[in-house]
Image (cartoon, rainbow, N blue to C red):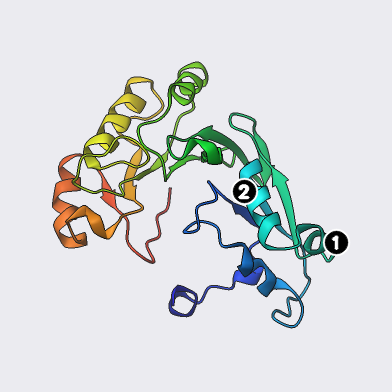
Amino acid sequence: MHVLQYGLDLSKIESCLITHNHEDHLYPDEFLNRTEGFAHIENKVPLKIYGTEPTRSKIARYVDLESLTRSGTISFICISPFVPFNAGGYEIIPLKANHSAELEPVFFIIGDGEKTVLYAHDTGYFPDETWRYLEEHRPYFNFVSLDCTLVIKKCRHGHMGIDTALEVKERLIELSCADKDTVFCLNHFSHNGDLIYDELVPVAEKHGFLVSYDGMTLEI
């Protein structure tokens, strides 16, 4: 629906960051739809997929990863928390997430040398290792997108509600990773959170948060 509504051309995507391998974030069978017979991509280059080892293992269980790699359909690059890499002209640093630990989940710092974004979805209150990294390196974020899956319900582990997102915001400001000019946005909502968009906006505004919506674009 979103591809049609917003005129998206998925064949132009060259890099894909995977936070973890739960099925609502990774459905490996879809990679088969990039192969000939299903897709006819001009100037075909492999889709570079970045994820931790459990993500690679899941893809390999469902599709022939070696065959897709040989055919130039996809290319999987294993990443690890706190080890920077470059993709699509951006420097990216995976941070350890507070989610299903056995999946080695991560979220991302993404920078282009001028502006830096913190994309922190599918995580509860950040793990101690991640806070230590932020305390040591003190990156400054122009934009922060925070998990708010449980919306106004209390949630600290695995996901966040607005109360925990506010704790994260305040600690980032304490560490000088953010300030009054940083744009904070709530994202990754669940229908279990009790509020619809129009009800959440005034609650979020009190705490200095934007609320994301389908098709939202922001200039940072």
Task: Say which residue label 2 marks.
Answer: 55
Q: Residue at x 32, y 24 (%)?
A: 171
Name the residue furthest top: 136
With 11 as the anchor, is 102 left or right in this view? left
Q: Position of residue 32 (x, y in %)?
A: 69, 71
218 and 43: which is toward the camera? 43
Between marks 1 and 2 in the image, the one whose residue lies nearer the viewer: 2
29 and 194: which is toward the camera? 29
The answer to whether residue 86 is seen in the rendering is: yes
With 136 as the anchor, is 80 left or right in this view? right
Residue 1, disc: none
52 and 44: which is toward the camera? 52
Q: Residue at x 81, y 57 (%)?
A: 66
Query: Which quadrant of the figure has residue 183?
Result: top left
- The quadrant the N terminus occupies is bottom left
Q: Position of residue 159 (x, y in %)?
A: 35, 42
Q: Secondary structure at mark 1?
A: helix
Task: Say which residue label 1 marks.
Answer: 70
